[in-house]
């Protein structure tokens, strides 16, 4: 009932734009469409494109998938789908057609299938025999009719099972960053903290206009899977000349075989031609321009057909709602300012010459990274940030709300959801994403109701649980959160996976309770 009324509310106020987070609602990116919600492995959540702050001759592209990962979600945790093409597309001449495609293809590998365990003991490296399940991937660059394998058989950084299983997760993360063969560039694939931050209760703000309600990051404690690359700007630019052609458009998609055949013996076979089932460029834009009934269609669509969405952008329903609640002065329609942000790029900033309007994330690579990024990006005169590409720290919810309210036309508002940053700090080098939350670290919501019985001495715990991001930074994720100081690790290291096994069973029980 709650589920249904929230969804109805989202539909009614046309405002899922600002709610890219909750399992119970639509959103631009997390579970935004009916079919995507039923197929989390093919659900893209966020896309990032920015000039690398520590390597400014390069651009970093990151693509996040599989939302709402409860860290303790064993025993299978969170692999990507086999048989799927996970792509990042680059349009470097503005004609809405991809010129370069980077493609990730994943393969499952079990060392033994005689156990239900993801790992059969502590895992100290990606090649550790204790890591029973691994995914490997091939990364291919497709351009000009040529397929070039950049990475082959690289190992994905695993789901962070817990501090006992993965005592030094940072090491696993580091090992998962690999260099291309035959070309300059780096690739990463693995689990990470969900880098998107927002307050779902913005619904309350808009429904009840109560500013006190906002300010908690609904995605705190959840993980995603992420893959990405760091490549020279010239590799992305038209004619390999980023000096002359610095503006690129970026979007990410998944395509999978059209048919899934399930056998009576529990087997599955994928067959048929490849069909696109997920598409993501600019954050949250799906909700702004696409009617709810067409969201699955949007996921199957291509930028070259986006002109059909133009009227929706020129006179957005969202503004009418904002206007009602905040007495905003309506900017003149058609909204050329919104067309520039969402479909063409902004004049003088990131609009390609002769651009064909289409929904892509556009990045002008010639703008140097800002050593002190402003979360409001271009709205705060920080042209290295959203909507010129998107950095991990950019507060796209606040920016888009203000842009829709007319910020580019001089309308000043302080619209926002009260969440200004991610709960974890980001790293200083590729892939920059915060480490994933570990399965041994209860999510904050779970902590409130169960911690007094299951954990000792919480009050003296130095805030390590309550502030689960603060101390973690980009260092050893699991190590800082366990108040038992290595005892479980020692046990497991000495004996075998007894503790792991108990933890997995406990996780299963907790998970089952939560979903019941
Ligand atoms: Ca093109
Ligand atoms: Ca997060
Ligand atoms: Ca915000």
Image (cartoon, grey):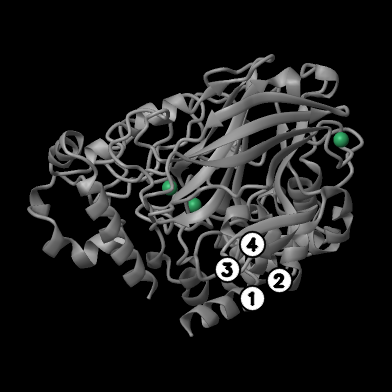
Q: Are marks 3 and 4 in contact (CB under 8 Å)?
A: no
Q: Nearer the viewer, mark 3 or mark 4?
A: 4
In the image, the residue with mark 4 has its CB under 8 Å from the nearest atom of ligand 2? no
Q: Residue at x 68, y 47 (%)?
A: 84
Q: Position of residue 268 (x, y in %)?
A: 63, 59
| Residue at the image position 88 percent from the left and 55 percent from the top | 307
Residue situated in front as seen by the camera: 313 or 473? 473
**Which mark is drawn over residue 292?**
2
- Front of the two marks 3 and 1: 1
Which label's residue is closer to the chain start, 2 or 1?
A: 1
Residue at the disc numbered 4: 36
Assess disc 4: are there few (<14), some (14-19) or many (≥20) residues with their C-alpha within 10 Å of its C-alpha: many
* Residue 331 appears in the picture as rendered: no
Q: Which residue has dot 1 on it?
A: 11
Name the residue at 40% across, 30% down. 172
Specify the quadrant that holds the C terminus.
bottom left
């Amino acid at each position: 009932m709650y589920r249904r009324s929230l969804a109805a509310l989202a539909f009614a106020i046309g405002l899922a734009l600002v709610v890219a987070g909750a399992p119970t609602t639509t959103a631009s990116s997390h579970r935004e469409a009916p079919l995507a919600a039923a197929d989390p492995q093919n659900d893209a959540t966020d896309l990032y494109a920015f000039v690398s702050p520590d390597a400014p001759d390069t651009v970093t592209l990151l693509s996040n998938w599989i939302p709402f990962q409860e860290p303790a979600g064993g025993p299978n945790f969170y692999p990507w789908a086999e048989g799927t093409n996970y792509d990042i597309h680059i349009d470097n001449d503005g004609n809405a057609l991809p010129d370069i495609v980077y493609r990730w293809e994943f393969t499952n590998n079990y060392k033994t299938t005689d156990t239900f365990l993801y790992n059969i003991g502590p895992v100290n490296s990606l090649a550790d025999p204790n890591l029973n399940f691994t995914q490997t991937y091939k990364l291919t660059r497709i351009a000009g009719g040529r397929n070039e394998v950049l990475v082959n058989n690289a190992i994905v950084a695993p789901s962070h099972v817990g501090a006992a299983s993965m005592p030094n997760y940072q090491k696993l993360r580091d090992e998962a960053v690999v260099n291309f063969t035959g070309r300059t560039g780096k690739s990463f694939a693995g689990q990470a903290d969900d880098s998107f931050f927002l307050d779902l209760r913005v619904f309350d703000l808009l429904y009840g206009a109560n500013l006190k309600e906002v300010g908690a990051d609904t995605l705190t404690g959840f993980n995603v899977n992420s893959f990405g690359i760091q490549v020279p700007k010239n590799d992305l630019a038209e004619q390999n000349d980023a000096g002359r052609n610095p503006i690129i458009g970026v979007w990410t998609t998944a395509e999978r075989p059209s048919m899934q055949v399930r056998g009576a013996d529990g087997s599955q076979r994928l067959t048929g031609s490849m069909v696109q089932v997920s598409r993501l460029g600019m954050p949250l834009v799906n909700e702004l321009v696409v009617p709810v009934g067409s969201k699955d269609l949007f996921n199957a669509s291509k930028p070259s057909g986006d002109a059909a969405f133009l009227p929706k952008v020129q006179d957005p329903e969202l503004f009418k709602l904002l206007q009602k609640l905040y007495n905003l002065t309506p900017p003149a329609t058609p909204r050329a300012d919104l067309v520039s942000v969402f479909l063409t790029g902004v004049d003088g900033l990131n609009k390609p010459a002769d651009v064909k309007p289409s929904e892509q994330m556009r990045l002008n690579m010639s703008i140097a990274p800002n050593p002190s990024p402003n979360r409001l990006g271009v709205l705060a005169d920080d042209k290295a940030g959203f909507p010129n590409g998107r950095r991990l720290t950019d507060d796209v919810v606040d920016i888009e709300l203000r842009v829709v309210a007319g910020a580019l036309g001089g309308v000043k508002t302080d619209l926002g959801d009260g969440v200004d940053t991610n709960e974890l700090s980001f790293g200083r080098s590729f892939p920059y994403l915060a480490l994933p939350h570990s399965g041994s670290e209860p999510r904050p919501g779970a902590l409130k109701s169960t911690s007094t019985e299951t954990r000792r001495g919480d009050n003296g715990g130095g805030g390590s649980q309550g502030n689960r991001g603060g101390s973690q930074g980009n260092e050893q994720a699991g190590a800082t959160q366990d108040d038992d100081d290595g005892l479980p690790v020692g046990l497991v290291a000495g004996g075998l996976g007894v503790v792991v096994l108990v933890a997995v069973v406990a996780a299963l029980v907790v998970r089952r309770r939560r979903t019941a």
